Amino acid sequence: MRRGKYSMNKTPLTLCLIYEHPKILLGMKKRGFGAGRWNGFGGKLNKDESLEEGAKRELHEEAGITATEMEKQGILEFEFQINGGIFEVHVFQIKGFTGTPKESEEMKPQWFDIADIPYDTMWPDDKFWLPLFLEGKKFRGRFLFGENDVILANKLSEIENLK
């Protein structure tokens, strides 16, 4: 799927998470949108880049590792009431990779035991969909954020197939 297939008011983004039970790799965002929060790795697509290509590129740029096997597990839409526009985030589980996670200018990777996921320093929506991700389930959701990133409305569903 190429970027050109998206409507102008939906911005496609990628999010990669590496989960090797009982550990998950997250990155502390050091600058830009979401700075100061633990998150997965990903971001915007380059022109004519597929979702998978963008996800692999971002993972390598932010954590210094190369995805060798990945599976799309979810699609999340985020709307911010203050600035409008919708982010359509395609969530990938990285099932295989080469290299060792290392700090970049943008992210500081760290492994967490799933019992110690730092939800209090993550985006507030993560506590809703991340458990589905960890269970290996596919999902689709939508979150509306108000001032100070407060969730005003949300809808999350487990689904069988992602398109």
Image (cartoon, rainbow, N blue to C red):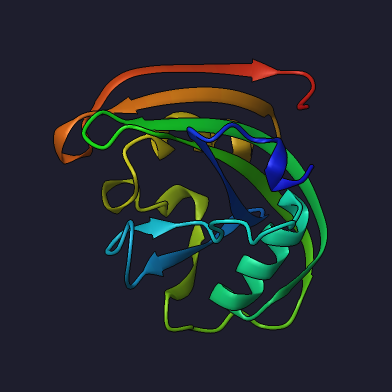
Quadrant of image for the C terminus: top right
> In the image, residue 156 lies at what x, y percent?
51, 19
Q: Residue at x 79, y 46 (%)?
A: 71
Q: Who's the residue at 54% across and 32% down the image? A: 76
Quarter of the N terminus within the rendering: top right
Pick the residue in front: 64 or 4: 4
Using the rendered view, name the quadrant where residue 28 is placed: bottom left
Which residue is drawn at the image coordinates 53% and 35% (left, top)? 8
Q: Is residue 36 left or right of residue 46?
A: left
Residue at x-position 57% and y-position 57%: 24
> What is the total number of numbered labels drawn onto the structure image?
0
The percent coordinates of residue 153 (x first, y second) are 32, 17
Q: Position of residue 52 (x, y in %)?
A: 76, 54
Answer with the quarter of the image where residue 158 lies. Answer: top right
Q: Nearer the viewer, residue 21 or 46?
A: 46
Query: Does residue 44 appear to the left or right of 4 in the view shown?
Result: left
- In the current view of this chain or complex, which residue is farthest to the left? 147
Q: Is residue 96 above or below residue 6?
A: below
Instruction: Judge by depth and name the residue closer to the eye, 68 or 100.
Output: 68
Q: Nearer the viewer, residue 67 or 79?
A: 79
> In the displayed structure, does residue 157 sit left or right of residue 146?
right
* Image spot of residue 126 (x, y percent): 42, 39
Q: Is residue 1 above or below residue 160?
A: below
